[in-house]
Amino acid sequence: MHQPGDPDAAHCVAWGPGAEQFLGLLPALLGADDDASDFVPSEPTVAAAHRRLPHLRLGRTGQVLEALVPAVIEQRVPGADAFRSWRVLVTKYGTPAPGPAPDGMRVPPSAEAWRHIPSWEFHRANVDPGRARTVVSCARRAASLERLTALPAAQAREALTSLPGVGVWTAAETAQRAFGDPDAVSVGDYHIPKMVGWTLLGRPVDDAGMLELLEPMRPHRHRVVRLLEASGLAYEPRRGPRLPVQQIHSL
């Protein structure tokens, strides 16, 4: 995909069995359906971020399981650990990307493939049994999960949290990507509450404090977080060592 001379246009060529579906979803993926017309922030830092990036749009993939599985793998572990686990599983159980793709590029496993990954392969990928069971359980419900795209975002998030092993953080991370939900706040995140607190107040806050700060921005609370991050105005001092990687696969 590339942009021709027109900043309001994109040229895309797709390959493989899902090419037609992907092209149909492309406008939404690029944020064409994102409506920020009622977003008029009054908080000074948020307003400054919006001025820097007035055309920021939140895209949506329309693919629920594709967003849900990596969110489950990211639960309660450092990002680097989750990315490694994802890479190990996709490399082994994904399929080669179609078309003129770079060497080694893989398409994530299908729902059928996720359902049949043995428990010891999750273990080797450093994914604990709880997260592994959640991934397999979600894959078994893939057809009903994809129907959530027809629901209002808040209702779809609530439905996600009814799944065993899927809490508010995982539902929010999924909703941000699959539904383009502008109000899905990642409650329970290790970094985001502190970042919001430091950026808007000059001190860290917990989840409750973050929600209080973001409440006036509803229904655009996730949009605010993305604006702060993407604009370069987000601030969080680095203190102490990083979280250690849990080497589950060596046990």
Image (cartoon, rainbow, N blue to C red):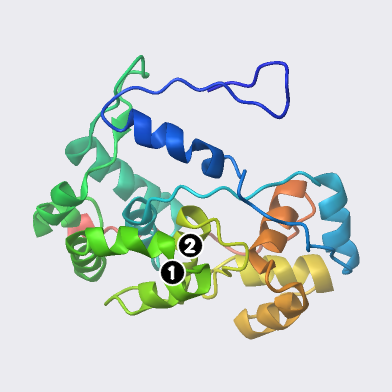
Horizontal and vertical percent for residue 6? Answer: 73, 21
Query: Is 92 situated above or below 171?
Result: above
Amino acid, disc 1: Ala
Estimate how packed mark 2 is, as few (under 14), some (14 to 19) or many (20 or more) residues with alpha carbons within 10 Å: many
User: Which quadrant holds residue 35?
Assistant: bottom right
Left or right position of 91 against 41 = left
One can see residue 22 in this view? yes
Q: Residue drawn 52% across and 23% down?
A: 1
Left or right position of 69 against 53 = left
Estimate how packed mark 1 is, as few (under 14), some (14 to 19) or many (20 or more) residues with alpha carbons within 10 Å: many
Name the residue nearer the viewer: 42 or 130.
Answer: 42
The C terminus, quarter of image: bottom left
Question: In the structure shown, which secondary structural element does the residue marked by tag 2 occupy?
Answer: helix
Mark 2 sits on what residue? 175
Q: Are the residues at dot 1 and dot 2 in contact (C-beta closer than 8 Å)?
A: yes
Left or right position of 183 against 199 = left
Horizontal and vertical percent for residue 85? Answer: 30, 49
Determine which of the numbered discs, if any, sits on residue 171 in the image.
1
Label total for image: 2
Name the residue nearer the viewer: 54 or 244.
Answer: 54
Horizontal and vertical percent for residue 201? Answer: 82, 74
Q: Residue drawn 8% across and 55% down?
A: 118
Q: Residue drawn 35% across and 29% down?
A: 19
Left or right position of 216 against 88 = right
